[in-house]
Amino acid sequence: MTPALSAAVAAIRAGGMVILVDDEDRENEGDLVMAADLVTPAAINFMVTHARGLVCLPLEAERIAQLGLKMMTEVNSSPRETAFTVSIEARDGVETGISAADRARTIQAAVAHAATPA
């Protein structure tokens, strides 16, 4: 593991964010990445204020199935074949779903070991 990668992993494990940059021949962008189980309202606020993109939660196919999530579209015509599910919101502890606190709560709920489908 390179020193830069080791530092990034350590930062993520400590609850920090790193910028993960993809190849120039792909999207040529950077994504703010952090451990989902350590996300906070302050982290979500930072993401939406400074990165200004879509806040996404990557989940493995097994977890998507466990939570009973549906794919956003059955036929994915995206050039990158980005596999989005329908939007989710925590069953408990949220109000409108849009605040940084509500988004952080939803992410924490989705990755909790005891999470079940709605």
Image (tube, rainbow, N blue to C red):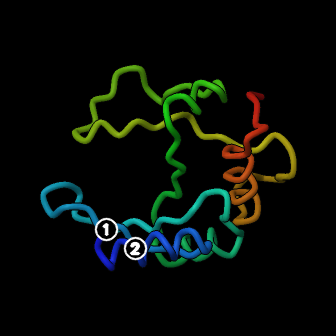
Query: Whole-percent x and y of residue 70?
Result: 56, 25
Q: Counting other residues with Cα less than 10 Å from the Cα at mark 2, is it few (<14), some (14-19), or many (20 or more)? A: few
Residue at the spot 42% in from the left edge and 78% down from the top edge: 7
Mark 1 and mark 2 in contact (Cβ < 8 Å)?
yes
Dot 2 corresponds to which residue? Answer: 6
Judge by depth and name the residue closer to the eye, 87 or 57: 57
Q: Amino acid at mark 2?
A: Ser
Quadrant placement of the N terminus: bottom left
Q: Relative to 66, is 87 above or below? A: below
Judge by depth and name the residue closer to the eye, 35 or 2: 2
Where disc 2 sits, the SS reads helix
Q: Amino acid at mark 1?
A: Met
Q: Is residue 31 left or right of residue 61?
A: left
**Which residue extends farthest left?**
25
**Which residue extends farthest top?**
74
What's the mark number on residue 1? 1
First-in-chain label (2 vs 1): 1
* Residue 112, quarter of picture: top right
Residue at the spot 61% in from the left edge and 72% down from the top edge: 15
Residue at the spot 51% in from the left edge and 76% down from the top edge: 11
